[in-house]
Each structure stands twice: as C-alpha cells, then as structure tokens.
Amino acid sequence: MILQALVDYYRRKCDDPDPVQRLPAFGLEQKEIPFILEINAAGELLQLRDTRELQGKKKVAQVFRVPIGVKKTSGVAANLLWDTLEYVLGVDTKGKPDRVAEQHSAFRARIAALPEATRQDAGIQAVLRFLDRVDVPQLERQPAWADALEANAVMSFRLQGDMDLVCQRPAVVHAALNTTTDDDAPQAMCLVTGEHAPIERLHASIKGVWGAQTSGANIISFNARAFESYGKTERQGENAPVSRAAAFAYTTALNHLLRKDSPQRMQVGDASTVFWAERQDPFETIFGDIFQDNPDASTDKVEALLNAVHSGHWGPLEKDLRYHVLGLAPNAARISIRFYHCVTLQELGQCIAQHFEDLTLVRGPNDPQYPSLFRLLTAVALQNKADNIPPNLGGAIVNSILAGPHVPYPSLWLNAAVGRCRAEQTINYLRAAAIKACLNRQIRHAQFLSSSQFASARASIETSLSPSFEQEFLPMLDLSNHHPAYRLGRLFAVLEKIQEEANPGLNATIRDRYYGAASSTPVAVFTTLLRLKNAHLKKLLPGRTTVFEKLLGEVLGPLNDFPKHLPLPDQGRFALGYYHQRQDFFTKKTDDTTTSKEGAPV
C-alpha cells in the first residue's frame, strides 16, 4: 500500500506542469553537482565552474538530472559521466594513489562501455579527449579548485555552448535508460505493480531521514540468512520482489519528499514525517505548517482549516481527496515505518480540528492559540530542551491525531506532563493543555468502548474513570466537575491565593514546597494546609476573608475525605483543576454575572 502510493505519486510528479518540479524518468536521478568542468570540442578546459550559492550560512549546490548512480559500498564503482573528483580526474585527495588510479580507470571504463553510436556523440568525444590529457597545473589555477580538492567534490562535464551537462545529452540519456536492467536479472511478478518484470536486487538508499545514516538507509533490505526465504539467498531482492521500475519510482518519490527544505515534510520528534495527496492540491504543501512552530504562518492556516471543517466548504473535488501521511524513523542501516495513514481531506481536517479542540484551554495573552507540536513536546521535556524529548513520543502523538478522535494519546505524554509539573512545581499553559487533551481522549475512548459491542474491552479502562463516565474537561473552570482530584487541585490554588494576598511580595508559596505531595498523597498535606490558612485569613480585610471562605465552602462541598493516594491520571486532574482555578483568579468578571454549575451566567 505504501509503496504503491509512492509509485502513484512519482508518476504524477513526472507529469508535473512545472518543469522544475518534475521527477526524473527511470534511470535518472536528481543530484547536487557542486562543480562543472566546462570544456570545448577539442577537450580543452575552459573553466571549473562553481554552482554553489549561499543560502543562509551554507553554500548549496545546483541540482541536475543525471544518470542514476551506482550503490557504492567499500569497493570501486563509477557513475556515468559524473562522480567525485578522484574518480573523474584521477587526482589523489586522501593519500591512496593506487586506489585513486583504480577509481579513475573504472570511470573511464564506464564511458567505454557505452554503445559505439553513443560514444560518437560530440559531448562524449570531448570528454574522452579531456581525459586523455588531464592538465592538473591548469586545474590548480582555477579559483574553485581548492574547494573542490579539499572536499573531493562531485563534478561533471559541460560542452561549450550547451545548456545541459554532457550526461544530460539525449544520446547519453537514451543509453542510460536502455542499460539499467541486467541481462541476468530474474523475472517475477512485482508486488507493487503486479507486472511480470525484472526484479531489483538492491534498492536505492533513502536519504533525509533524521538520525539515519548520512549515506542513506533502506526500507526494503535483507542482509542475513534469518531474514531471507529458503532458496533466495543469492539475490536479496527476490525475498520481496519489486521491479526495477517500481523500486526506482518509490525511492525517487520518497527522496523527493524528504529533500532539504521540502514543504511536504516535518520533523516530529525522531519521526521524519512526509505527506502527499493522490492529486495536486494546495493543502499538500501547508499541512506541515499546521504543526510547525511558526505562529505567524500556522495560525491563519489552522483557522482556515477549522473554518472549512465547521462550514463544510471543501470545494467540489477536495472533500474526498485522499491524503497519505507517512512517519519514518531510523533503525540502524534500515528505516522503520513509525506510522502510515491514508484518509480523505475531510477526515484529515476533522482529526486535526479535534486535536486543537482537545488542546483548547483558557490562556494568557502571550500563549499561542494553536500550540505547535514542537512546543508541546519541549514543554514536557527535561529543561525544555528538544534533545530530551522522549524519542517515540512525537510520532505516537501524530499517529493518535490521525487515527481518529476516539484514539487516546500515548500515556507517555500524560506521564511526562504530570512528571514535569511535579518536578518543577510549574503548571503552565502548554503542560495543562497537554494534560487536558490526554484526559479528554481517555474519557472519550472509555465512552466509545462502553458503547461498542466488545464488552470485554471495558476491563482495560482505567479504574480512575467513574463508572458513569465523567464529562470531558472544559477549556475554563468547571464548577460542575465534582471529581475529587479536580476539586483538590482547585483547593490547592485557593489556599495558595490566600497565602499570596496575606503575604504580598512572597518569594515562595505553598506550591514550591507542597505541590508534589499534595498532588500525589493529599491526606498527608491538606490537613496541614487548611490549618495554616486560618492564620493567613486573619491578615486579610473582612470582606476579602468572606469571599475566600465562600469559595472554600464551594470547593470543599462535594469532598467527603482526602484520598491517601492519587494515581497518575488523577494527578493530571489535580494539575488541571489547579490551572483552571488560578486562571479564573485573573479573569475579569462582570459585576452582575457569575458562573452556574453548568457554566451559564446567572
């Protein structure tokens, strides 16, 4: 399914109306060529041209469509009319002259192996003349020579007067396309296309997956007998037969999606996530902006998506357009599939809208309306550093978002958010939003299971959920929520507020000393805190004391006793109750309205 979708995307991009966006035909690939040897018909060097341009702080080489490169290991294997400086010119850069001589011979042999008619091409003849008398002193006088020599850079040839490289000339391309299939390649049914065709033995490497080998890794590969089928040990590709054309198509498409600065990829934790549609669509390039940490761009795009979800105005063709979202993670020399979803645009929009609805929470003026996934992840990481984000968390969250509104978020997210609140005694907007989203998903998942026909699955519901199934948490303070943990969180916030008003300018409050114990073992803390609050109330004006006493009575009303221990989900409810109550203290209220148990003005 995944490979087939990538092959379909490759075919679409081959016919892209924008020539710059077209993918190369079978037998060709897109390659950065930093340096070009410009020669005349007599094989004389005119200049060593540097194609690199400064982008930010780095120099980026120009991309050319060239004959597909061979898969190199430790041996010597040359590409057709393009390769590193050692292969092309036979100049030693690493102190291994014998190996360089062998590499240069392989480069020339690759050209000599072309059909006779192809070798008569003017560009090939010029290259052969140049190689017959490589003038190293002349090369050393070129301004770009020092950079090329130091990096053993990739280079190719261009004939004077041509716009294309020599390896892009029609005769060379035709020869490359007609010699990509080995004569001894076994014939079998391709698992991707269903056609009877030559099978690819080694698939091209996938580059751009964060954390994988820089030289590239593979989705399909076999390198040990334990992974191979009986009798299919000599040619590894026979274990998962994929035709050469299909293997080229899916690897080219995936490398295109994973390329640098691609608008169709995003990094979510350790999961390199790519996305594409079954046909051209503007949302194909803005999907990643919704989750990225770019408030100026993402806010408008999220609002546009939510408006389309709520209004149903998708356009005549967009509604049923299917989108593919693929998450890839490194696994030694291989790439593992972290998640894959194929959904319609309408379903995708509804899933994303539900995600942001689950995160919706009363917030301060500087808090983002639609927090990015990166901010949510760093908020629950040690020291708020991206390096400390749990490796599998980002991909698991995206998987839950796209799986539907009834699929709970990973428990690791709730654990990390609650753990950070306890460790730092700080319940900020992002952590509270993560806790609210996780708890609401758990509640919705429990209700979904209870209404399904699988009664046995009910046993897996957390014991912290009420038998009657509690209501989902609101974005703001909910006076009708009688859950003990939520009430205790509110109570802790009220006691802290009393202490702050009784002791203006206090550097440390009860939160700094007691939050961890209060959220996990309430009975050991709250009896002491309630006794201490009497001393604080005596310092306040009578009117203010009356306000706090009424508020304490409202909060404590449904509580029968202080629990000895709160499980982790209830610690999340405690944190959310604390956050809601604290935010309510700083919310401006009108004189003639208050909030009823249902949250309506009375």
Image (cartoon, helix red, strand yellow):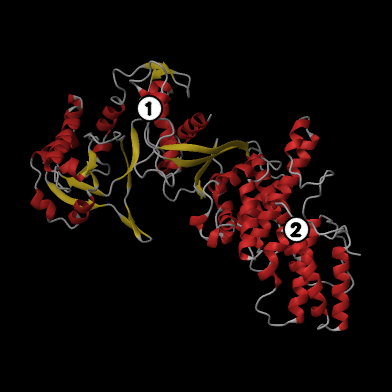
Question: Residue 115 at x, y = what percent?
Answer: 20, 25
Task: Answer above or below: position of 542 versus 360.
Answer: below
Q: Rounded to the nearest whole Å, what is the CA distance between mark 2 and mark 1?
A: 54 Å
Q: Which mark is residue 475?
A: 2
Question: Residue 464 at x, y = what percent?
Answer: 76, 47
> Residue drawn 64% across and 39% down?
403
Depth order, front residue of 119/200: 200
* Quadrant hosting residue 520: bottom right
* Quadrant hosting residue 598: bottom right
Dot 1 amino acid type: Ala
* Quadrant hosting residue 179: top left
Question: Residue 572 at x, y = what percent?
Answer: 70, 55
Label 1 environment density (alpha carbons within 10 Å; few <14, some 14–19, many ≥20): few
Dot 2: element: loop
Quadrant assignment for the C terminus:
bottom right
Dot 2 amino acid type: Pro
Depth order, front residue of 459/206: 459
Residue positioned most to the right: 602
Q: Which mark is residue 168?
A: none
- Is residue 355 in view? yes
- Is residue 160 in view? no
Question: Residue 87 at x, y = what percent?
Answer: 19, 40
Look at the numbered discs 2 and 1 and tell me whether their residues touch, using CB distance below 8 Å.
no
Residue 529 horizontal side relative to residue 568, left or right: right
Residue 443 horizontal side relative to residue 286, left or right: right
> Residue drawn 68% across and 82% down?
505
> Residue drawn 29% across and 35% down?
69
Disc 2 or 1, which lies upstream in sequence?
A: 1
In the image, which is nearer the foreground, mark 2 or mark 1?
1
Looking at the rendered structure, the number of numbered marks drawn on it comes to 2
The residue that label 1 is drawn on is 224
Label 2 environment density (alpha carbons within 10 Å; few <14, some 14–19, many ≥20): some
